[in-house]
Amino acid sequence: DTEVTQTPKHLVMGMTNKKSLKCEQHMGHRAMYWYKQKAKKPPELMFVYSYEKLSINESVPSRFSPECPNSSLLNLHLHALQPEDSALYLCASSQDRGDPRYNEQFFGPGTRLTVL
Amino acid sequence: DQQVKQNSPSLSVQEGRISILNCDYTNSMFDYFLWYKKYPAEGPTFLISISSIKDKNEDGRFTVFLNKSAKHLSLHIVPSQPGDSAVYFCAASGWGGGSEKLVFGKGTKLTVNP
């Protein structure tokens, strides 16, 4: 299984809503990532989890809250978002740092988020 | 401060010919480089990578060349096929920007015409 899955595929939410994005991988990867991608821009790193611990937070606003319940799952909890947070949210995973292919990240299809 | 640059936003080639996508980087701490391909409404798909200890890596129709002294890498696709039409992102990894992470270029949209 070389797939990273993300749910939901599309999400529309109001600024007062609370929602969660989910990501799952079964490749035995121990590093998982959240990226945000706006149209015609490259993916921007938000968070990195390594061995289920948060290792990088790229100064992301607290209205985004990541969670890694186990080595296969990664969630992104959303609360009080702004319309400018509308984007494609991508999850990725990779081998652990001891593996020379650590930097080869495998991406999911993304969740297209629209904040009204 | 753009550490990974893809200066051509788009490239158009004929089917069967060679596609050459270019990427420049500024941070000498980068030591691993990757190319990703992205179709609309999908996540990026890993294509090929190269470590800074090599100057060439080949995988089927795809070859990546690295020129460390020029801080330049390129992706060659031979022969190009219509299914190769997508946005290609160059990415670099290493100790850049205060942490180890992937830094992406802005992408080049490749169109392969039948």
Image (cartoon, coloured by chain):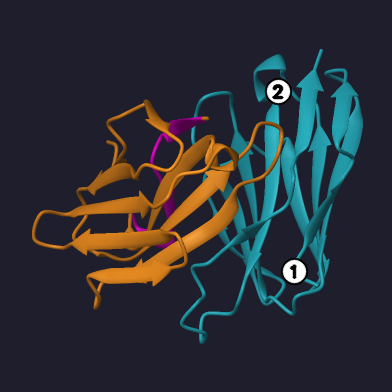
Image hue for chain A: cyan
A41 or A65, which lies in front?
A41
Q: Is residue A48 above or below residue A91?
A: below
- Tag of residue A86: 2
Residue assigned mark 1: A2
Say whether residue B54 is magenta.
no
Stretch of the chain drawn in magenta:
B97-113
Residue A25 location in percent, x, y? 79, 66
Say whether residue B107 is magenta.
yes
Where is the N terminus of chain B found, in terms of image quarters? top left
Residue type of the residue flagged with mark 2 = Ser
Check if mark 2's residue and mark 1's residue have beta carbons within 8 Å: no
2 or 1: mark nearer the eye: 1
Q: Residue at x 24, y 49 (%)?
A: B25
Rate crowding at label 1 as few (under 14), some (14 to 19) or many (20 or more) other CA atoms within 10 Å: few
Residue B37 location in percent, x, y? 54, 46
Q: CA distance from mark 2 to mark 1?
A: 28 Å
Which secondary structure lies at badge 2? loop
Residue type of the residue flagged with mark 1 = Thr
Chain displayed in orange: B
Chain letter behind tag 1 = A
